[in-house]
Structure formats: structure tokens, C-alpha cells
Image (cartoon, coloured by chain):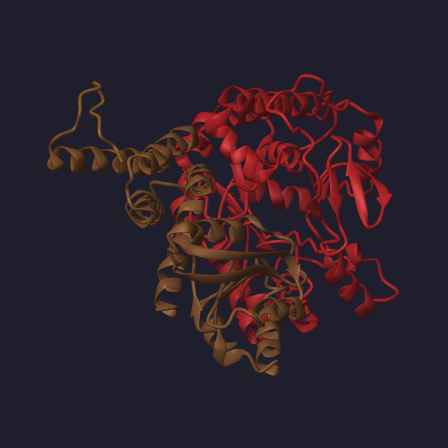
Amino acid sequence: MLSYYPNGSHIQNMADLEVIMLEILRSLFNAILEGDQLAAAIHVQAAIDAGIDPAEILNQGMVAAMAEVGRLFEKGEYYVPEMLIAARAMQASMVLLKPKLLQNEVSSSGKVVIGTVKGDLHDIGKNLVAQMLEGAGFEICYLGTDVSPEKFVEAIRSEKGCLVALSALLTTTMPSMKNIIDAITGAGLRQDVKIMVGGAPVTEAFAQQIGADGYAPDASRAVTNARLLLA
Amino acid sequence: MDKRTVMKMTLEWENPPYVPWNINFTIPAKEKLQSHYPDQDLEEVVQNHIVNVGYDIYFYNDIGNDCVQDCFGVVWDRSIDRDIGVVTDQLLKEPTLKGYAFPDPLAPYVFAEVANQLKKYGDRFHLFGIGFSLYERAWAMRGLQTLMMDFYDNPQFVHDLLNSIADYNIAQINEILKYDIDAVMFGDDWGQQRRLQMGPKLWHEFIYPVLKRMYGVVVEAGKKVFIHSCGDVDELFDDLVGIGLSCFNPFQPEVMDVSALIRNYRHRLAFYGGLSTQKTLPYGSVMDVRRETRNLLELGKTGGYIFSPAHDVPKDVPLENILAFIEEVQQQPGFINPG
């Protein structure tokens, strides 16, 4: 627990302690927002050393920062490079915080099984979605690209209640999304999961047509929709 | 009047006798069309108006396992996407060009077929296309996510890489200008379905100055500059016109207002593309395809527009839809089909 001011004298005032802790979280927030992975790692360690509750570090320092990244992306101020460096800073923080989260039995926002569908090798869009979801506190199971229906079914067998996120960049590979939903249904698992789809040619109408539960036009809204679907 | 003249009139808004077209196909779509015309040369069937004596991606060698390696050393997996493929490795593992040698821009294979092609298709508009010409070539060598982060992590390296690629391109452009060509087309995807990939700030800082240098060589020689850039990139049009852009492709209707742009950029920027490959062509009826094609031809009838699907025709387009838009363009009054 933090007990010294930066100048070395003892902290005797609880209010001052709270201010310092808030300042540490604010510094962590800013480091992630600015994509400074070194600063993010320093500040998350400082937060841990100060005895701040790990769940609070996660939610106030990291999830909040990634939510702001998403907001700025939707507003058109952040683009893919800014999202990537912010996600990298968040992941650097998470490496240090995760043992504390496990120790304190802090649960995730939910589990997401994500992959690019069979026949499609594009991955940056799907990776951005996964990183934003991780930044929002979800636990991610990465399946990669060119993922068969069978592999999706296998991955979700033990993950009841998870969100399945499907990505396709081409009109020629979009039909694979229906195949995956059909395979999940055929395996008797459809009622146990929620399914969200996305990718450049994918539309809300298409998502409804194939029986998906949700559609996200970008990584930021994937987070919003994931929270709604797993609420 | 030959096709080359019609194209030149189109690019100057000189009321061409009909709207010219140029239609490219992915390998599977081409095979589909060829099976419908088993004994015919598809060039004679389609009657394209452009001959591209350049290249779409790079020159490459087949290295087995459905993989090819291009002249820059990048390995592409073509097991699924047979036209372009997916980069399988990271050629530049560190943010430096030390130890890397660019291929010879004037290698014989680049220009080996130019004279023959120009002679064979002399009646068409002569275009030299450089595919993956700048930002795409950079990320193919460095990795897309890594290059995106390099904008912030290693800015000088990105400047050096882009300028080195430009030097390569300019050497080829100077050579191709010795031939009878009309335009150079730079292929480089900057867009997403919504907005730019890297955003306008980074685009202006890193990509724009290099484009200005490359386009300048073409413009100074009195030739036209074409670009291909997929996605939502129309916010860049004024800047690109300012450095010499004459014609934009692919002109995807899902991401930009094709009618408004043809009108608003009249006498400043011509457009090449426009027929939906995300919606109409794969999912629309024959009547939908005919209607959209006719609308585009109407929009472009006084010039400034070259008809084409908004990308190489993909494999999920029904044959009847392909035949429909080919028929529509060839039925234009003013076009005399030599076939």
C-alpha cells in the first residue's frame, strides 16, 4: 500500500492517498490512450504497488481507456494505427495485471470465440475487434483465419454462454457464416451461445437473414454489441 | 474512331460517342465466362478499351505449396485467393532497410512484353499499371499491423521505406515513358468500408509527399495519372487532383456517392468503375444489373466516366449478370462491335 508522497514524506491524509491513486489510474488511462506501452506498464505496476484494487485498475485504468479509444474511432479521430498502439499498450498492462486479477478472482466480462470464416484469410479487422473486446474486459479465444464450422463447434463446446464472433471480408466468403451457424445449430449448441458477425461486405440485413444475433460495422461497436448480447 | 481516341475524349469531357469500358475478372470468374465462350478469345468477346502493359501485383516465381515469391522477396499464399494471395512472412523483420536490396526496377521481365502488347492492342488506351505501388508494397514487406504501428514507433523508417519504393517506381516510370503510353496507374488501397485505414493525418504526413513526387514525373511527361484505391477514400480527391490525378478507380458505390461525384468533379476528375461488386453483381437480378449499368452509362454520357465493375469480377457473380452488363455496354449507340 502506498504510504509515501512522491517527495518521500509519509502520506498521513486518506484524501491525499485517494488523489494519488486516482492520479496513477489517470496516468495509466492516458498511457493506453496515447499508445505508450512503456508508460502503461510503468503505471499499471505503480497501481499494483499502490495497493489499488485490481478490478479497479482494470476498469478505471484500462477498460475505460479502451472505451475512449472506441469513442474516438467512432468519432473519426482515431484510426487503425491509433487503435493498434492503444491495444498494444493495454495488452502490455494486462500481462502485469492478469496474475492479480486471477489472485483476486476477478471475472471477465464474458468469453468470446473469434475467427475469420472458412475460405477467408483476412485478419486485421478481426484482430482489431478481438483487441477492443479484450480491452473491454472480455476473455478471447483466438481461432485465426480460414476457420471451418467444425473448428468453431469444437471451440464452443465447453464455452456455454460465450459470444461467437465471425469475420468475413469478401462476398464470396460470407456464405461460410451461415454454414457455421448451421453447424452450431446442428451440434445442439445454438441456444447456448450468441453469434455476432462483421466485415466489410456484411450488413445488418445479412446478419438477420442468416440468423445471427448481432452485427457490428466496426471494432468499437463490436464491443457495445458484445456487452448487450452477453448481458 | 478507335477505342484509344474514345478514351482520350472521355478523359477530357469531349462528348465521346459512347461510354468506354474496361472489365477485369478474377481467375474463377474468367473461367466461368470462358466456359460460356469455349472457342472464343475473351478479349474479342469483352472488347475492353484499355491495355495494361504493367502489372497488378509483382512479378513472381512459383515456389510450390500454392505459394509464390515476388521480385521483392515477399511470399504469397495463393491456396485460397488465387489472384493476389495472402502474405505469409515478414520480409523486413526490423525497422530498417540495412541489408535489404530492392530488385532491379529495370529488370528485363518488367518490359519484356510491353512492345508486343502495345502492338497487339494498339487501338486501345495504353496504360502502365503499378500494382501495390506504395503503402501496400510497404506493408507487404513489413506486415500490415507492424507498418501501421511503425507510423508512430519508427516514423523515419516509414519515410525511408516509402521513398525507396517511390525511387523504384520512378525508375520504371522513366523507362516506360520511352514507349507510346497514355497513362500510369498506381494501385494502392488506403480505404476501409468507412474512412481511411491510417486516417488523413498520417496519410498527409507519410504518403502524400511521396505521391506528389511520383505523380509529378508522369504529369511532367504530359501523361495521365490513374489510381486504384479500394474503400472510402473520397476525402482525398481534392488533394490528389491537386498533384495531378486524372482518373479514379474503383469507385465503389457502397462507400461513395457515384452520381454526386461524377457531377461534382466534372472537368477535374474522371471515374473508372462504379458497378457494385458487393451487392448488385453477386446478389442482384439481371434487371438490377441492367438498371444500374444503364444509370452509370447515362451519368457518364458526356465524358469523365469509364464503365467497369467496382473491382475485378469476383467468382460469386452469376454468369447471367456478367453477360447482362457486357451486353448493355456493347449495345450503346455509337459503339460498333468489330466482333
Side (left or right) of B17 relative to A112? right
Tell me which chain appears brown: A
Side (left or right) of B242 relative to B150? left
Nearer the observer, B251 or B302: B251
Please name the residue shown 65% across and 29% down the image.
B93
Q: Where is residue B269 in the image (x, y as percent from the top left)?
A: 47, 40
Residue B147 lies in quadrant: top right
Residue B318 vertical placement versus B297 (above, below): below
User: Can the viewer see residue B217 in this picture?
Assistant: no
Tell me which chain appears red: B
Side (left or right) of B246 relative to A133? right
Q: Where is residue B104 in the image (x, y as percent from the top left)?
A: 77, 22
Which quadrant would the C terminus of chain B be assigned to in this image?
Answer: bottom right
User: Can the viewer see residue B140 in this picture?
Assistant: yes
Nearer the observer, B52 or B211: B211
Count the numbered circles shown.
0
Q: Where is residue A24 in the image (x, y as percent from the top left)?
A: 27, 34
Residue B239 vertical placement versus B235 (above, below): above
Nearer the observer, A218 or B201: A218
Please name the residue shown 33% across and 34% down the image.
A49
